[in-house]
Amino acid sequence: TKGLPAIGRRRVDTMELTKGSIMRAYNSDTNQQPIVQVLDVKKMTAKAGSSSDRYRLVISDGEFYQQGMLATQKNHLIESGDLKSFT
């Protein structure tokens, strides 16, 4: 958990998710620090010529869900176990 802000280390089941934050982010609202839950993490094997594996995340705000790719610079969060499904 080192390197994550204090809020990132807290268990989601003790906190309320920020409902509607995914829709707001989708509509380009960058003035929020929402609490969301990672529902799924899937490793996407690197293609030939690529040096890094990629991870697909599914996140939920308790109302909506969204999937996307984790930036390769953040792969260490998955590999260390700091970020995983249902966190």
Image (tube, rainbow, N blue to C red):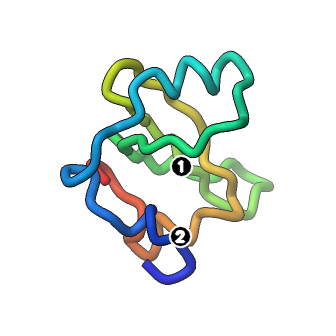
User: Which disc, if any, is residue 55?
Assistant: 1
Which residue is most to the bottom?
2
Is 59 situated left or right of 86 in this image? right
Nearer mark to the viewer, of 1 and 2? 2
Q: Residue type at mark 2?
A: Pro
Which residue is most to the right?
49
Residue at (20, 54) in percent of width and height? 14
Residue highlighted by disc 2:
5
Which residue is more in the foreground, 19 or 47? 19
Tag 2's secondary structure?
loop
Q: Position of residue 79 (x, y in %)?
A: 47, 71
Image quarter where the N terminus lies is bottom left
Residue at (40, 19) in percent of width and height? 64
Q: Is residue 40 above or below residue 65?
A: below
Q: Is residue 1 above or below residue 9?
A: below
Residue at (69, 16) in percent of width and height? 27
Which comes before the other along the chain, label 1 or label 2? Answer: 2
Give the quarter of the image for residue 35: top left
Q: Residue type at mark 1?
A: Tyr
Q: Is residue 2 above or below residue 51?
A: below
Q: Position of residue 71 (x, y in %)?
A: 68, 52
Which residue is more in the foreground, 54 or 81? 81
Q: Position of residue 78 (x, y in %)?
A: 46, 64
Give the quarter of the image for residue 49: bottom right
Residue at (36, 43) in percent of width and height? 37
Mark 1 to mark 2 CA distance (whole Å): 21 Å
Tag 1's secondary structure?
strand
Image quarter where the C terminus lies is bottom left
Q: Position of residue 15 (x, y in %)?
A: 27, 49
